[in-house]
Amino acid sequence: MEQIKLPTGEKLWQSQLPNGLSVFVLPKPGFRRTYAVISTHYGSIDSQFRREGEQVLSVPPGIAHFLEHKLFEEEEGSVFDRFADLGASVNAFTSSTQTSYLFSTTENWQEALIQLIEFVNKPYLTDENVEKEKGIIEQELRMYADHPQRRVYSALLEGLYQRNPIRLDIGGTVESVREITKEQLYDCYYTFYQPGNMALAIAGDVEPKEAHSLIAEHYPEWSHYSGPVERFFPTEPKEVAKDWSEEEMAISRPQYLLGFKHDPIWRGEEILRQQLIMAIAWRLITARSSQHFNELYDKELVSDSFGASFSCHPQFAYSVIGTDTDDPERLHDELTRIIHELRREKLCPTELDRLKRSLYGGHLASYDSFEYAANRVISNHFNQIPSARFLPLLSSITAEQVTAVFTDLLDWNRSSVSILRVKG
Amino acid sequence: MNFVQCNLGAGVRLHLCETDKFKSLTCKMFIQQDLNEEHATSTALIPLVLQRGSRQFPSVAQIARELEYLYAASLGMDVLKLGERQILEFHFQMVDPSLLPDSEEHLERGLRTFWGIAADPAVENGRFNETFFSQEKANLRRELEGILNNKHAYAMTRFVQLMCAGEPFAIHKYGDLQSLAKLENEGVYRHYQSLIRSYPLDIFLVGTNLDVIANLLAQLISEREQVVDLSLPKGVDVAKLRYFCEGTDVQQSILVLGYRTNRTYLDDGYYPLLVANGILGEFPHSKLFVNVREKASLAYYVGSNVDGSKGLLTISAGIDWREREQALAIIKQQVEQLRQGDFSQAELEQTKVGMINSMISMADNPSSLIVRNLMGVVHGDLRSIDTVVEQIRAVEQRDVVEAAEQLVLDTTYILGPQGEVGGTNGTN
């Protein structure tokens, strides 16, 4: 097992089983709780793929999320019951690139870990139980449809992307979910749940060697397809699909989002570096310490929800900034002006240093959250991002790199605005 | 992971939990008062105004720069509602100074900043800075209007207003728009001063070297006056079942049922009530999840929870409007089964170990470790995690049935695509 020293002084233990599964252990002495998560590097965007020597398969949007729901199904009894017997709580979530199954417990972590490994490796699908799930997922999608932040964000992604499946909702649509069949679910399962495409992370007061042997002993043999999976993504044009889109909803105040599409050029360590550069760049506009934020706040154009993000993956990269506001047009003009000004403004060394301190402190504190730390270890692993390089990369960032975000990266010809207006 | 208590003056209690488990030092302060129409909105405005600037750091930017310099120290304020108390919450967290270079200096600097923002605001001529006051009044208005944006939160707010009309519990933790319009700077500032000086104040600290911090805080606390006496909710008898249906523009309908529990935190049967709620709707193995979601496919979320101070059990579910009668019938059937003792030993055991698991888990998060004590603070009866675990462990089937027998349905509410705006009253 390989040991990686973390910025907090803690150690992360990393290993790989002969079947290809990657295993991470983050020992947390003195903690009562143990958290474990198994993830497959497979999410909502992986809807076209080919196993070696076979035909290309295309599956309906929302299938990764559907499969996540269905893995909780068993021939007899229920997965929830088995964890409940142990006093453990179990859950799962799906993102655009990953599906994760997790538990948290204060007792019997070994037994809970064995149960987790077992249910993720034992799909039980029938035409009947697949049909039954459709009503539940439909209610989940309708709940999201009533959620204004989610609506305006979905509309933004549809505006930014013409063809990449990131433009579609993770859960699919009520219609696409209705199309999903048992056979398609099994195809996806036997393609993407092979151990070589998966990782397991555990955090808690556990002994790394014990955890490793327990996993090695109980991870079942994989007797299905095991080998490379070619994933197909439509070529995304440079241009956005729509530069402006509007919708209406019964809300109290309009919501505004501005997005920029980037070429997904970063890989590995460069993803982390660019994430840090973007975090600093966006803070120059949205942080409470920024002069620009305070001007916008005084003009009553932004609320406390004002924030920005950067999403970066080998298949897509985009930046988003936005808030709820009484006057989306005026806020748009102000942001245009501010981003323009930041091309010329020189970032002073004290400010850069202070923002770095803030990112560093936030990073240290993040290790107090098991969920966050363990999930990040896995997503970094899938994208080959070296977790332990955080501090040296942060230190190396220069004012010029931050300015380049405004001069080069935020390209107005590749931007899109999404507005949710007040109905009635 | 227990707290050691000491008094720092009239009505000021300090609770210390010395531990090196976390990477952070966490401090929370709570000032509690009775929830009432006269002051609720005024109290809600105070944290918004305070966070705009203190005497030492007179702007948001200056506060934020100081916090960034202190390696992302976080400082926040909010208003909480627990039963019929409204609680002003001040929160401060910074990376444990021992993990940082030049640590001693940072600790004192951080705490002084925190204290200054909470207790030494930007004041001019006996009132808050006028710009801060008027801007934050507008922000609170937007916040109150914005309750509408989260349909579940909106449904719960309307439900409580309708079910508990005339009781203090009906008041939203942020007050209401009518009272907000009438608020004036001087009045809110006077209310703030009286809160700081004469209402019960509880300070919680989790981290290392707490004696240094306790000494520092003791110097900062200003003079206190006589402490105001607070009250607890009174029991309510259900006169008749009420049914409300409200129409709005939604894709999903939200169904809410409210039961009076007739027992609260200070009663002997409190933990059996919590276990009854657990069997009914707190977990994925609970009756509501299994029967409404897994068996009937009617909902994605369905569950129940208890306000142990007010004595209220609430069930909520997101469903299709056309299936509301079916959902309602299945939900009521689950409560009935609980009353009949129609649940297995396994359901009881799973619920108890699940509750014990979440109780023990709180020891792993500094904020939960502190916030879980609020119920004890409000009722003047603090209970350690170990005590609560023992109480839950001791609950038996007949205790659960007794608790369930005391549940009385008071109000059913549905927010759906049809029905009248503002809600109609009828019988169930």
Image (tube, coloured by chain):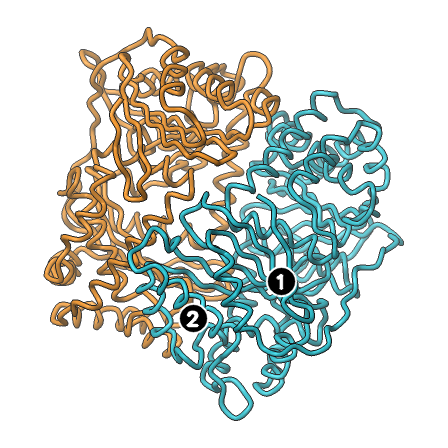
Residue that badge 2 annotates: B113
The chain drawn in orange is A
Q: Colour of chain B?
A: cyan
The crowd level at tag 1 (other Cα within 10 Å; few <14, some 14-19, many 20+) is many
Q: Examine the rendering and report whether any part of residue B141 can be seen.
A: no
The residue lying at 51 percent from left, 60 percent from top is: A250
Residue B236 place in picture, x, y as percent: 85, 56
Q: Please, which residue is most extreme toward the bottom here?
A: B125
| Label 1: element kind | strand
Picture quadrant of residue A99: top left
- The three-letter code of the residue at mark 1 reads Asp
**In the figure, is residue B68 to the left or right of B256?**
left
The residue lying at 17 percent from left, 47 percent from top is: A392
Subunit ID for the residue under disc 2: B
Residue A206 place in picture, x, y as percent: 43, 26
Q: Is residue A95 above or below residue B79?
A: above
Are discs 1 and 2 located on one and the same chain? Answer: yes
Subunit ID for the residue under disc 1: B
Residue that badge 1 annotates: B202
Task: Residue A176: give its label.
Answer: none
- The three-letter code of the residue at mark 2 reads Thr
Residue B113 place in picture, x, y as percent: 42, 71
